[in-house]
Amino acid sequence: MKGKRILVLTAVFVLLILISTSASATTLYVKEGGGTGEYGNLQEAINAAADGDVILVREGRYSENVFVNKSLDIIAKDPCINNTVITALDPEYPVFHVTSDSVNISGFTLKGANLTYGIYLDGVSENKISNNSFSGNWRSIVLKDSHENSLENNCLSNSDNGIWLESSGHNIIKDNKADFNRHYGFYLNASENNTLQNNCAFKGAIGIYMENSSCCRVLDSETSNNFYGIYLTGSRESLLENNTANANEMYGIYLGNSNGSTLKGNIANTNHWGINLDSSFNTLQNNTMSGNSRNFGAYTYHYTGEMNNTIDTSNTVDGKSIYYLVEVSNKTLDSDSNAGVVYCINCENITLKDLVLQNNSFGVYLYNTQNSLLEENNISNCEHGVYLGNCSLTTLRNNDVNLSEGDAFILSNCRNCLAEKNNASNNMAGIWLCDASRDNLLKENTVTLNSWCCIDLGDASCKNTLERNTLSGAYEGIYLYGASEENTLNNNTITASSYGLFTEGCGNNTISGNCISGNDVGISLNLNWTDGTNSDYNTIYNNYLNNSKNSEDFGINTWNISKTEGGNIVGGPYLGGNFWASPEGDGFSESASDENGDMIADLPYNVTETNYDYLPLVFEKPVEKTENEYGKK
């Protein structure tokens, strides 16, 4: 009983203190030009106020830089924010510089701090900035080392930046609208555990940007008609839920090195890229991407990671499901699957057949996936068609890839893969073997009208075989670079390109049986432009060359083998060198003498000043007819 009486007395005592504190709060008035019992500007009122006081500012046009070092409510008395305007007297200082906790600023139009900030919260907490309009500032609201503040229902426009957080956490940023800002609508740097809810950012460079700001939440917000919509980098374990990112020039939503984040219920339509993940261990559910040039993409180009994301088929691209398979075996996806894009990470024995895939960063992406088959798929208008990374024993057969912004097929660090009878047209490049891809076979592929090259081997991609491919209409038919050696290129047809075969610093390759014609230059063997290594010790024989210029050789190479029995490329009985034709019909092999009729020229062909084809091939000459053979006397 005694304890209960003490508790009641304590409660009464606390209540009396609160009433006393509330009763002691004073209301101060500010009026443009001053008046009886009113201050002529805010700074005078603040200087006269005590912690907990209220300053009511009547409508008017004020010109000053206000320093707030007390806990105050500073409120515009007129409900229309356009009627109470404060313009920075000195544009190098903030309109409001707040260094005290528990400050409330509401109802103003703040402008003119074009070299600094509209409101600057400097190392403070529990402040509320609400119902204000900002324009013509460098940054509208800035928080530095400030925590547990609330920024609500502010309009941020026609400035460099809207809301800017540096090293500030646990803040609520809600119901704000940022538009026509030159750079950022909302910017967070090294600011964790913030919540951004129901904000809008329109017509700026980046709507919402978070850098090294983990564990933040972006909810129910719209970022549209910007250059980038929502852009996270180094911001892990973030939540993006029920946001709309439409009609942005580049990304709707981008995550870079922001692992462990969750994206739920977001809409990203009519951007260039819809949702792109350059991160791992993320979870995506019920996200919708439609009408983007590239709806969805996941990769680890710029940051390390194994791409172990959790992405289910509730996520859609142009109304079709995303299949993101991780550690799955023995699965087939065909036209009945309604797949819009397919990723296979750490999988085995996957079959992808008869799929129509378009408008994504990749049509198909396989990483560390073995013993799989891609067959008769149609992939178009993607950044890249098919990507195989660290894959082996995988077959690409009868796939059609066209209109890719980049490569139709990429094989990166792949071994013992087969690409056969695929068609690739109107891409930047056809088939690219890179990152030490070895022992792969590319055969009977048709690659046409690519702006860069048809097939390129680079980055020490060795011991691969290219045979019976038809390649035309590119800058380079086949391009070898970066110490790609011991490859075999035989029986390919290369036409209508600037270079039929172009090498940079690649040696010990065998180039034989190819028909290289109608190009500006047939075969060009060059220095590596990065380290100066030469293209040496290649063996080039039994090729048909009929180009504006058949050869360039800046190394030490062999242009024939020993005379060997066996049918050659122009029907002769011996293998030896190459057939040297010209578009005018007067090439060396077309006019060289062959006294013994073995279809090997009697004299060598001078490829360069130091390199020779010692056994150039010739056509069998028709027997000249006499007048009697024509029935003439």
Image: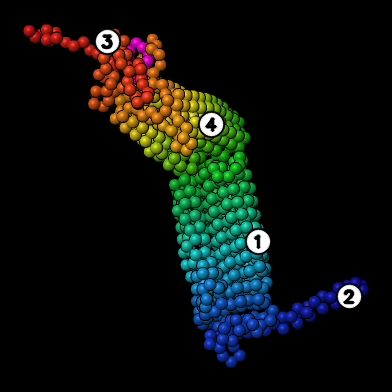
Q: Residue at x 63, y 81 (%)?
A: 46
Q: Earlier in the sequence, mark 2 or mark 3?
A: 2
Q: Earlier in the sequence, mark 1 or mark 3?
A: 1
Magenta span:
569-579
For residue 322, the mark is none
Secondary structure beneath disc 2?
helix
Splitting the image into 4 quarters, where does residue 78 fall? bottom right
In three-dimensional space, the C-alpha distance between marks 2 and 3, rounded to whole angstroms, equals: 130 Å
Label 1, on which residue? 169
Measured as percent of width and height from the top left, residue 355 is found at 47, 35
Colouring of the image: rainbow
In three-dimensional space, the C-alpha distance between marks 2 and 1, rounded to whole angstroms, equals: 42 Å
In three-dimensional space, the C-alpha distance between marks 2 and 4, rounded to whole angstroms, equals: 83 Å
Label 4, on which residue? 436
Q: Earlier in the sequence, mark 2 or mark 4?
A: 2
Asked whether 23 falls inside the magenta stretch, the response is no
| Dominant SS in magenta | loop
Measured as percent of width and height from the top left, residue 512 is found at 40, 21
For the residues bearing labels 2 and 1, Cβ distance under 8 angstroms: no
Amino acid type, label 3: Glu
In three-dimensional space, the C-alpha distance between marks 4 and 3, rounded to whole angstroms, equals: 48 Å
Amino acid type, label 4: Ala
